[in-house]
Image (cartoon, rainbow, N blue to C red):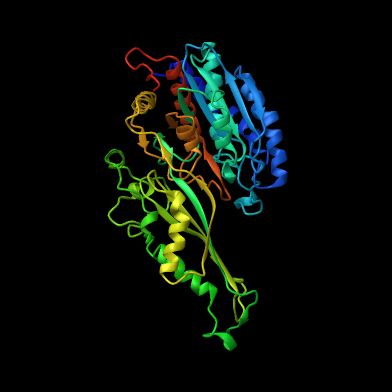
Amino acid sequence: MIPEKLARKAAEFVDSGAFFTELATMVGYATESSRPEGRLAIEAYLDEVLTPALADLGCEVTRYDNPDPAGGPLLVGTRVESPALPTVLCYGHADVVEGQAGRWSEGRDPWTLSADGDRWYGRGAADNKGQHLVNLAALRLLLAEQGSLGFNLTFLFESGEEIGSPGLTEFAANHREVLRADVFVGSDGPRLDAATPTLFLGARGGLQLQLAVDLRPDAYHSGNWGGLLRNPATTLAGAVATLVDGHGRIRVPELLPPEIPAAVREALTGVTVANSPGDPVPDANWGEPGLSAAERLYAWNTLEVLALGAADADRPVNAIPGSARAALQLRYVVGTDADAVVDAVTRHLSEHGYPMVEVRALGNYAASRTPFDDPWVPWAQAALEEIADGPVAVLPNIGGSLPNAVFTDVLGLPTLWLPHSYPGCLQHAPDEHLLAPIAREGLVLAAGLFHALGNPPARRPLPVSG
């Protein structure tokens, strides 16, 4: 159980406005990893915000060049209290997606944190600056309260998560000793809903595909040439329909996962998704038949069309376009052979009469999860439920994608993700926001979990690392 004084200080840190003020400073750095000027902001954010924050925790801070030129620098803070104590590896990402200035409602500036009731608007407020601020603040409060953490801490920040974490896998493989730990604790993505504290154990993979139909360099008059020339837009629409039908059902067997494991199915029994006010209602007849909404989101694969087009759809002319493009994304769970997807899709399209469609993979986050029977899972669930004084949802993985495989597969760690946002936060879109009540509850939960890690009661000792 979290000490009452520590819980009170955690809540007061949000209620007093101190959390908002600190987050406002963080949001003010336009750390867009997809833009050259954003790279300069990332450098400043690491130097001026994260390095002092880690130093305040008594960490020795080291900055590393990324082994991949496409990625940004990495920052590691290390605090060693005793070789006999367990080590906790924490994670956050300094970068954000593009700010999309001019598209936010009420004239909001993405780089200025603004409050409207319980909603705190700003790019990075939920993804990921607000979330790693919760964990930094929780560690800071715990250290101030008891003079030590009770465990060794390694905190890793990357600066390219929003562009696929280039170099992170290689960095982890080359710095295993630096990142050696007993358990991973991170915060990203949404909880199940705004009201439910959540622990998820991994992430679905995300493989982006580009389909291209390049038939000719010029467009030809549709009256003079219609019915004579193959239309690449029509061809592409037909090709996509053979991959995923008009009801969201995947039609390529190699893109489907294996059967849902019994432990995963049991964990998702009774789980309700899209349960926050204002959430869209899931379509009952969309996606794989026979699955619950929770199983479709957390335990199955989906193939989504992200963009589809030819010529100028807003200003069409009477001409058959010469080319067409589509961007698709396969969200997939553990057990899917992602390496075989491009060949499988190419073969499938050829068999269905579309050999002219070129298929390319543009990026991939591997799927991964910590098993439910790993001893850290029931330990963390029990600790969090004691702090929350109520049930905590434990999910096999987040519906989205994260570099979780770096921690499970490369470093061999059990992964515990405690998110401090919710599905309606509009991350990656205009009007991204953090909910103040979730920040408040999240800070109490994080402080309590870190306290439990450093002060394990005799009746619930820390699991022994394998």
The N terminus, quarter of image:
top left
Image side of residue 121 versus residue 393, left or right: right
Residue ID at (30%, 52%):
291
Image side of residue 9 versus residue 369, left or right: right
Pinpoint residue 66: horizontal percent, then vertical percent.
64, 36
Pinpoint residue 230: horizontal percent, then vertical percent.
53, 79
Q: Nearer the viewer, residue 26 or 340?
A: 340
Image side of residue 395 versus residue 239, left or right: left
Residue 311, by quadrant, is: bottom right
Pinpoint residue 102: horizontal percent, then vertical percent.
66, 53
The answer, for residue 194, to whether it is visible in the render is no
Pinpoint residue 57: horizontal percent, then vertical percent.
59, 19
Q: Nearer the viewer, residue 354 or 274?
A: 354
Q: What is the total number of numbered labels drawn onto the structure image?
A: 0
Up-down: is 80 above or below 352? above
Residue ID at (48%, 18%):
6
Q: Nearer the viewer, residue 201 or 99?
A: 201
Image side of residue 67 versus residue 4, left or right: right
Up-down: is 393 above or below 97? above
The C terminus, quarter of image:
top left
The answer, for residue 368, to whether it is visible in the render is yes
Residue 40, by quadrant, is: top right
Residue ID at (49%, 73%):
235
Query: Which residue is farthest bottom?
Result: 224
